[in-house]
Image (spheres, grey):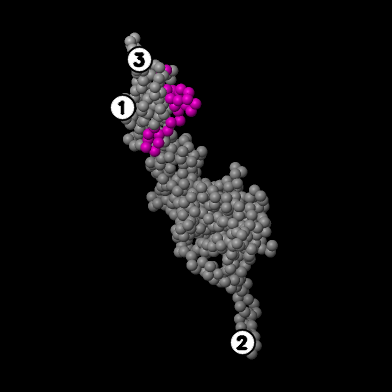
Amino acid sequence: MAAHFGRRLRKGAATTAAAAAAVAALSASQAPGVTTDPDKPAATGTSASAPEDGAGQNATGNSPYYTDLPPLNSPSPSPSSTAGTPVTQGDTEAGIPATVLDAYKRAEAELRSAKPGCNLPWELLAAIGKVESGQARGGRVNANGDTLSPILGPQLDGNGFALIRDTDNGAYDGNSLYDQAVGPMQFIPSTWAWAGRDGNGDGKKDPNNIYDAALAAGHYLCRYGWDLSVQADLDKAILSYNNSQDYLNTVLSWLEYYRKGTHSIPDGTGRLPTGRSDEPGRTSPSPSPEKPGGPTPKPEQPSSPPKPAEPSPPSTPSPPATPTDTVDHLADAGTAAKLSAMAGDTFAKKISTRAETKAGKSVGKVRVRFTLIGDTDATFAGGENVATVTTDSSGVAVAPTLKAGQKTGDFTVRATVVGRPAVKGLDYAATVTARAADALAPTGEAPLTCTAGGEFADQVTVQATYQGAVADGVAATATLVKSADDTTVNDKGPYFKDADGTAVRTLTDLVTDANGRITLPTLYADDTEGTFLLRIVTTGGATLTVELTVTAAATPSPSPTASATS
C-alpha cells in the first residue's frame, strides 16, 4: 500500500482548504462548541505554541492524528446484516480489520457491564482508532492483538507539540528524554500508567495490544460519570482524548460513518489514512510577473561588496519556568493520619495535599494525581482508581470523595505531581474494615418458650445498629451456649436443624439485611427441660443473649375405665 504510517506528506493550501470544507460539511449539524474537561484546560483548537510541561495531559498528549475524512456517501447496510454489525458491500473505508473490530466490541461489552450508565458505543472506539492509528495500521496485529511493529507518535518535546518530559524511563516508547504516544490508541506513558487495562486476559497491560488499548480507551472515555448518549458528554469525552475542535469534528464524522454500517475485513488489509494534523499546507511563492517589453533588468551589483561578519551561533533559549517546574515536594494539608471506612461506606475524610517550593512556599495551578495502590476495590467518585486535581491559590489539591469497596484490608493513596516524576510522591495509608455493629436488640418482647420435644412458635429476630444507625451487611454468629460464663456450645437443650434435619447449635455466615435485622431459623427442643441461652455476636463486638425456656410436656389424661355393668 502506498500510504505509510508516519510518512509526512506535505499538502498544498488547496488540499487543506478542501479538507477543512469537508469537515464543516460533515459536521455542521453536530459540531458542538468547545467544552471543558474538568481534568484539563478548555479546548482552543490547534495551537502552534506548546503548553506548559504537564499541562493539558490527556490520553494522547494532544499528539498528531490522521485528518482523512470518511467518504461523503456513507455506506448502506445490506439486507443480510446482523444486529449491531451491519455488513456493507461498498467503499473499503467501511471495513475494519477483524481482530481490531473484535477488540472494540469486546471493550463495549465489558463497559456495558462495568459502567452501564456510560453507554459507550464500539463505533466511538473505531472512530478514535481510525484517526489515531488508521485502525492499528490497517490491522497489522497478530491473533493476540499485539501490533506487528511499534506505533509511536513524535516525541513531545515542546517543538510544535506539547512538552511532556519522560515519565516511564522509555519503558513504553523507548525514549528516556520525552514521552511519545504509544500503540493503536496512542496513549502517552503517563496516562497509560493509570488508565491501562488488560483486555485480552493475558495478565499484562500493554498499550501495543489492541484489546488492552481499546478497553483502556473505553474506561478513559467513561470517567467522570459521562453518559456518551448525551451529546455534551460525548463532546467532553472526545476532547479529553485530544484537546482540539478539529479532532472532535473528525472523530464525530467517523463515528457517524461507522454507525451507518461496517464490516469485517482480514487483518492487515485495511486502508491507511494519508493526511496528518501535523502537516499543514504549504505554498511556493509565485514568480513576479514580467513587465511588457521584456524582462525586468537586474540591478547593478556593487564591485566589491563588503564581507559580512560571521554570525554567532544562536543560543537556545531556556523555556520559561512553569508552576510545575517550581515544585520541590508535596506536603499533607490536614488529612487524618490514617483513613478508615467500613466496607461499602464513604471515607469521611478527603485527602488534601499541598504543592510547595523548596522554601516551603505554596504553588498554585499544579496538577496533582491521586492513585490507589494495593489490593483494593475502593474507588474515587465516578468509579475510577485515579483522579487528577489542580492545586488552588493556596497550593492545595483536594482529592475527590473516596469510597470503600467490599474488600477489606490496607491500601495506599499516592499523590504525585503530573509532569514532575522527580518529585517524590506522598503516600496516605488507608484501610477498609468489615462492616460492624455496636449494638443488638431483640425486636419482640414476648418470652420464647416451648415444651420438651416440641418447637418454638416464634423465631428469634434481632436488630443491629452502629452508632445509632441501621447496621446492614454485618456478619454475625448465633450459638446455644452452656451458660453466661461458659460460652462453649451446649450439647443439650434447644437446637436448629440443618438442611438434612440434623441438630446444630451454632449458626455462622449470618448477615444483617438492609434494615439491619437477622431472623434466625426455627428452634426445636429436645427432652431436656430448663432455661437455656442463645448468644448472638456480630462483627464489631455487639452481643445479645436471649433466654429460651423449655417446659415439661403435658401429661396426657388417663382414659376413663369402662363400666362393669352394661
Residue type highlighted by circle 3: Ser
Give the total of numbered labels. 3
Q: Quadrant of the C terminus?
A: top left
Q: Looking at the rendered structure, which numbered label has been put on residue 291?
A: 2
Tell me where residue 295 appears, x and y as whole percent. 64, 85
In the rendered structure, which disc, 3 or 2, sits on the residue that comes first in sequence? 2
In the rendered structure, which disc, 3 or 1, sits on the residue that comes first in sequence? 1
Q: CA distance from mark 3 to mark 2?
A: 146 Å
Tell me where residue 326 appears, x and y as whole percent. 46, 51
Q: CA distance from mark 1 to mark 2?
A: 118 Å
Q: Nearer the viewer, mark 3 or mark 2?
A: 3
Q: Residue at x 64, y 90 (%)?
A: 293
Q: Nearer the viewer, mark 1 or mark 2?
A: 1
* Mark 3 crowd level (few <14, some 14–19, many ≥20, 10 Å Cα): few
In the rendered structure, which disc, 1 or 2, sits on the residue that comes first in sequence? 2
Q: Is residue 373 above or below residue 445?
A: below
Q: Between residues 524 and 385, which one lies in front from this camera angle? A: 524
List the residue tagged with mark 1: 446
Q: Is residue 171 left or right of residue 480?
A: right
* Mark 2 crowd level (few <14, some 14–19, many ≥20, 10 Å Cα): few
Answer with the quarter of the image where residue 482 lies. top left
List the residue tagged with mark 3: 559
Q: Is residue 23 above or below residue 367?
A: below
Answer with the quarter of the image where residue 139 lies. bottom right
Q: Residue at x 57, y 50 (%)?
A: 106
Tell me where residue 303 appears, x and y as whole percent. 65, 79
Residue type highlighted by circle 1: Ala
Q: Is residue 56 magenta?
A: no
Q: Residue at x 37, y 29 (%)?
A: 459
Q: Residue furthest front?
A: 566
Q: Is residue 249 left or right of residue 483?
A: right
Residue type highlighted by circle 2: Lys
